[in-house]
Amino acid sequence: FSIKPVQQFAYTSGKNATDSTMIIDAMDLLYTRRFEGFCLVTSDSDFTGLAVRLREEGLVVYGFGEQKTPEAFRNACHKFIFTEVLRKPVANEQAEVKPSPAALLPIEKPAGAQSPIAAPAEFPTAFLMAALEQSVDDTGWAHLGTFGSYLQKIQPSFDSRLYGFKKLSDLIKGKPELFDVEERPTPGGAGKSLYLTEKRR
């Protein structure tokens, strides 16, 4: 790949000087005033301050990291995406790639090894219902876009893919025990918009 490597020497044992160097580089880029946003790919909370500073300058900050990423850094970004949801499922890889004879031999899985795709997270029913309550209009219904924007605002790491749904609309439609859904014609257009409200008991 056309990537220029940068070497950062450790000034003392047990300390990592790379993070500080990267933050300095990011601030140098910030002050060029040529960029509208930054993408921070890390699971390290040391970059929380950088994300906050970038947002103070009015820039959009996207974060990418593993599910072990501290909540403080996730919430410091406008949008945080877990890298686990971007990985191809193991089942699909096995179906697409024809195994070699050696691959058919049993392989002992190391103790503590985990699958690349984490198990589905516990469904955040209380969080979704609280967000819906804040998103509804005077009629008691919320536009899907408004609902989604509110979810990202209060929890930037929320992602429907963590719960087995490709899109937010799929999640809403897949939970009929929680939501009533309506498709309404878009004003001035030929398409339709999705509206939702709490399930009527």
Image (cartoon, grey):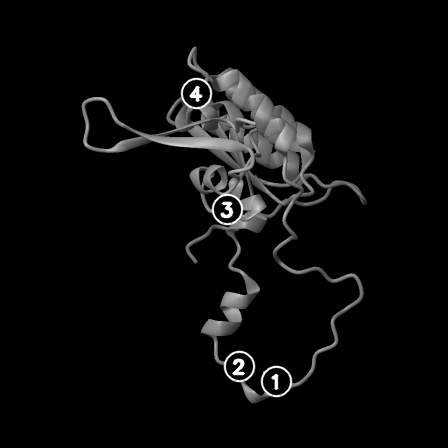
2 to the left or right of 74: left
Q: Secondary structure at mark 2?
A: loop
Residue lying at the far front of the rendered structure? 201
- Type of the residue with mark 2: Pro
Callout 2 touching callout 1 (CB < 8 Å) = yes
**Residue 154 in sight from this viewpoint:** no
Q: How far across and down, in percent of the image, does residue 30 sit? A: 47, 25
Quick one: label 4 or label 3, which is nearer the N terminus?
Answer: 4
Quick one: label 3 or label 2, which is nearer the N terminus?
Answer: 2
- Type of the residue with mark 1: Leu
**Residue 69 in sight from this viewpoint:** yes
The residue depicted at 51 percent of the width and 38 percent of the height is 176
Q: Which mark is residue 172?
A: none
* CA separation in Å, label 4 and label 3: 22 Å
Q: Which of the two marks, 2 or 4, is nearer to us in this view? A: 4
Residue on which the image places disc 1 = 104
Q: Residues within 10 Å of mark 1 (few under 14, many from 20)?
A: few
Quick one: label 1 or label 4, which is nearer the N terminus?
Answer: 1
Residue on which the image places disc 3 = 165
- Type of the residue with mark 4: Trp
Quick one: label 2 or label 1, which is nearer the N terminus?
Answer: 2
Q: How far across and down, in percent of the image, does residue 77 sit? A: 55, 28
Q: Residues within 10 Å of mark 3 (few under 14, many from 20)?
A: some
Q: Residues within 10 Å of mark 2 (few under 14, many from 20)?
A: few
Callout 3 touching callout 2 (CB < 8 Å) = no
The residue depicted at 58 percent of the width and 26 percent of the height is 129
Q: Nearer the viewer, residue 36 or 20?
A: 36
Residue on which the image places disc 2 = 99
